[in-house]
Amino acid sequence: MSISRRTWLTALAAAPLATAPFAALAQAGWPSKPVRIVVPFAAGGTTDILARALAPELQRAFGQPFIVDNKPGAGGNIGAADVAKSAPDGHTLLMGTVGTHGINQSLYPKLPYDPIKDFAPVTLVAAVPNVLVFNPAKAEQLGIRNVADLIKYAKANPGKLNMASSGNGTSIHLAGELFKAMTGSYMVHFPYRGSGPALIDLIGGNMDLMFDNLPSSMQQIKAGKLKALAVTSAARSPALPDVPTIAEAGPVKGYEASSWFGLLAPHGTPAEVVNRLQQETAKALASPALKERLMAQGALPSGNTPAEFAKLIDAETAKWAQVVKVSGAKVD
């Protein structure tokens, strides 16, 4: 943990009266204008789904519009950098991910932002497993009924399967790279600007498979437009109880690659603002209607404290650095 992180967390826990101009603004009645939630991926993916589910709840709580602003590209780096450079007045937030704040600094030679120094963690919104989905028609054509079939085909036909992802450095990308490394198989990676565009091509038959965040694939799985082979979590998902984990279906012993999503503000955002955001977000995520809605899509709502979220980011950064190393993943 950096000195700046420790100092910020100490101030946050105490929530003292600040003297900075932005703190004065917060005390004068934040939010005083619409709040922008930047989603660093295209519409239709899990990051977008969670932001759009949460925004109306925060709008009701604070009496100002909370507007979702999609800024996709570079594995989430463009949107994250936009927020990092924004005024720390509580009117610009990031729906960050394990990619933007756990993976990218190990994968990219240089980032346009510092995941630790440039942000104030607010709260973890939800954790989700990824799911290995296949185009049903292609799965039938190739005789791929399960993970074991996939491994057998991929090893016998290196480079013949196309693997879509929501972008370089995302948990979706790394889940696939880890799978390839642990099974000794090779599939061609095609990064998109979010899960939404990738899923369109997967359903349309332009891609063969994808490791997607469960919420963004759930409806397509239920509609039969995608074939779910396995989930990437250590245990089965309550939302898809009949779908095995990769570890048990492959079997690929020890395989696990889940995702998470959380709110972050620019570094320097007043502690009063961060604490109020965390409290209202936690209330919204604990409400029966939103909680049930998210869990039905495969997400596990959280709402933890800023200090707890900061600790998670530190731990995940170390964890994914090892995954990048083991998988040999590179930015295409």
Image: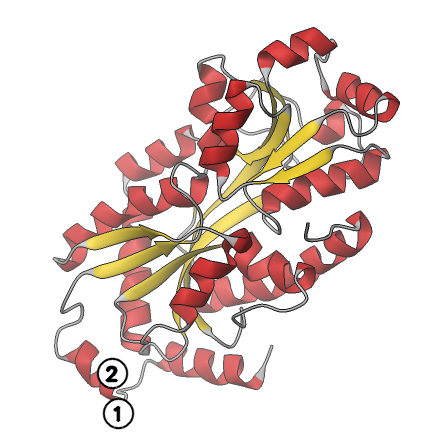
- Label 1 belongs to which residue? 19
Question: In the rendered image of this protein, does residue 6 appear above or below residue 184?
Answer: below
Q: Position of residue 143 (x, y in %)?
A: 74, 8
Few, some or many residues within 10 Å of mark 1 (<14, 14–19, 20+): few
| Image quadrant where residue 294 sits | top left
Give me the residue at 47% from left, 60% from top.
78
Residue 23: mark: 2
What percent of the width, then of the height, locates residue 157? Answer: 84, 22
In the image, what residue type sits under mark 2? Ala
Q: What residue do we see at 47% from left, 27% from top?
A: 200
**Residue 215 percent coordinates (x, y):** 45, 33
Query: On the image, which quarter does residue 120 sit in?
Result: bottom left
Vertical position of residue 226 compared to residue 80: above or below: above
Give the Cα separation between the discs numbered 1 and 2.
6 Å
Q: Which numbered marker is on residue 262?
A: none
Q: Circle 1 — which element?
A: loop
Callout 1 touching callout 2 (CB < 8 Å): yes
**Which x, y percent locates residue 70?**
36, 50
The residue sitting at 56% across, 86% down in the picture is 3
Seen as rendered, the residue at the extreme bottom is 19
* Residue 91 horizontal side relative to residue 146, left or right: left
User: SS class of the residue under badge 2?
Assistant: helix
Left or right: residue 292 versus residue 228 is left
When the figure is inspected, residue 105 is found, relative to residue 134, above or below; the finding is: below
Identify the residue shown where x is 76% and y is 57%.
322
Rendered-image quadrant of the N terminus: bottom right
The residue type indicated by label 1 comes to: Thr
Q: Is residue 298 visible?
A: no
Q: Nearer the viewer, residue 111 or 257?
A: 111
